[in-house]
Image (tube, rainbow, N blue to C red):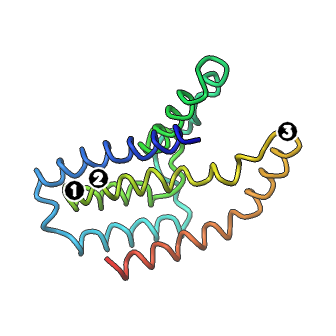
């Protein structure tokens, strides 16, 4: 589990640092905070009206499970989630946070990347006790039934970010 969080935080830090350098080169840091508010509001609207974000439709590679040591699998899975766009992109918020990170420059983009990576990996806390197909089925049903509440929380999160940016 530690490898998972380290991989997720490290990948988030790296990809957001690259974005921060790119944004600084383009002068995006001078657009903040208005740029961030517009980007986050646009993401919230796109999610609210149900337009699906672009991105891959793949999960992490299950074949790794029997092929590598646990910490390697954990780090690799975490890194994929920390990058954010190499697995399923669930909301426009993923793309929005990348753009906001690019507008922050270094070191704030790096800090945001670590937080993003860790945030994407928090779901592991809810799934770590799954030890049988029956428990997996129950957990998946809970996740499916919580989707509308999660969407509401995400939209409230967009609002909080817009107000605080």
Q: Is residue 160 left or right of residue 110?
A: right
Closer to the camera in the image, 24 or 14: 14
Closer to the camera in the image, 78 or 33: 78
Quick one: SS at disc 3?
loop
Q: Where does label 1 land, which residue?
A: 107
Does residue 62 lie above or below 159 as drawn? above
Q: Position of residue 137 (x, y in %)?
A: 84, 46
Does residue 29 lie above or below 4 as drawn? below
Picture quadrant of residue 99: bottom left
Q: Are marks 1 and 2 in contact (CB under 8 Å)?
A: yes
Label ID, residue 132: 3
Residue placed at 81% from the left, 44% from the top?
Answer: 136
> Badge 3: how crowded within 10 Å, few (<14), some, or many (20+)?
few
Q: Is residue 59 left or right of residue 18?
A: right
Picture quadrant of residue 151: bottom right
Quick one: SS at disc 1?
loop
Per the model, the C-alpha gap separating discs 1 and 2 is 5 Å
Q: Position of residue 110 (x, y in %)?
A: 29, 53
Does residue 69 lie above or below 21 as drawn? above
Which comes sooner in the sequence, label 3 or label 1? 1
> Badge 1: how crowded within 10 Å, few (<14), some, or many (20+)?
some
Q: Position of residue 123 (x, y in %)?
A: 62, 53
Closer to the camera in the image, 16 or 92: 16
Per the model, the C-alpha gap separating discs 3 and 1 is 43 Å
Label ID, residue 45: none
């Amino acid at each position: 589990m530690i490898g998972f969080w380290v991989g997720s935080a490290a990948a988030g830090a790296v990809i957001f640092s690259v974005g921060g350098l790119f944004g600084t080169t383009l002068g995006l840091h001078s657009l903040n905070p208005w740029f961030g508010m517009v980007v986050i509001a646009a993401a919230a609207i796109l999610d609210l009206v149900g337009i699906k974000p672009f991105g891959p439709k793949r999960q992490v590679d299950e074949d790794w499970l029997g092929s590598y040591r646990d910490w390697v699998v954990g780090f690799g899975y975490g890194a994929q989630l920390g990058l954010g766009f190499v697995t399923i992109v669930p909301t426009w918020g993923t793309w929005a946070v990348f753009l906001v990170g690019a507008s922050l420059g270094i070191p704030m983009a790096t800090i945001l990347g670590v937080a993003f990576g860790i945030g994407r990996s928090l779901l592991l806390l809810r799934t770590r006790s799954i030890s049988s197909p029956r428990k997996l089925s129950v957990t998946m049903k809970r996740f499916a039934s919580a989707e509308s509440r999660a969407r509401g929380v995400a939209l409230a999160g967009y609002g909080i970010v817009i107000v605080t940016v």
